[in-house]
Amino acid sequence: MSYPTPEALRAHAKHARQMADEYRAEGNNKMADRRDEDADWYEILCAREEWRIECERAEKHQEAA
């Protein structure tokens, strides 16, 4: 199974923040809050994926040593 890259997750978070700003500008605070929550989740997933990648690198480095 392939994982989304941290870059892709950051792009999703950025887009969600932009959508939240648009909703807020339209006065639709409920949808803006939902999109902010989506962005938060994408940022959490990005951090987890970066951590997973770092763990894999460390594991490979240890195996090579």
Image: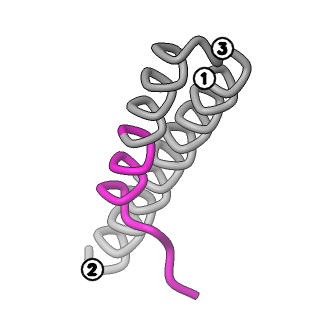
Percent position (x, y) of residue 2? 50, 83
Residue at disc 3, secondary structure: helix
Residue at disc 2, secondary structure: helix
Question: In the displayed structure, would residue 50 be above or below residue 29?
Answer: below
**Residues at marks 1 and 2 touching, judged by CB atoms closer than 8 Å:** no
Question: In the displayed structure, would residue 51 be above or below residue 3?
Answer: above
In the shown orientation, is residue 60 left or right of residue 34?
Answer: left
The amino acid type found where label 1 is placed reads Ala
Q: Foreground: 42 or 32?
A: 32
Residue at which label 3 appears: 29
Residue at which label 1 appears: 32
Q: Residues within 10 Å of mark 3 (few under 14, many from 20)?
A: some
Q: Earlier in the sequence, mark 1 or mark 2?
A: 1
Q: Foreground: 55 or 1?
A: 1
State the extent of the magenta-drawn residues as a range.
1-14
Foreground mark, 1 or 2, reads 1
Which residue is painted at 46% across and 48% down in the image? 46
The amino acid type found where label 3 is placed reads Asn
What is the number of the mark on residue 64? 2
The amino acid type found where label 2 is placed reads Ala
Residue at disc 1, secondary structure: helix
**Residues at marks 3 and 1 touching, judged by CB atoms closer than 8 Å:** yes
Foreground mark, 3 or 2, reads 3
Percent position (x, y) of residue 59? 42, 69
Task: Find the residue positioned furthest to the front.
Answer: 26
Rounded to the nearest angstrom, the CA distance separating label 1 from label 2 is 48 Å
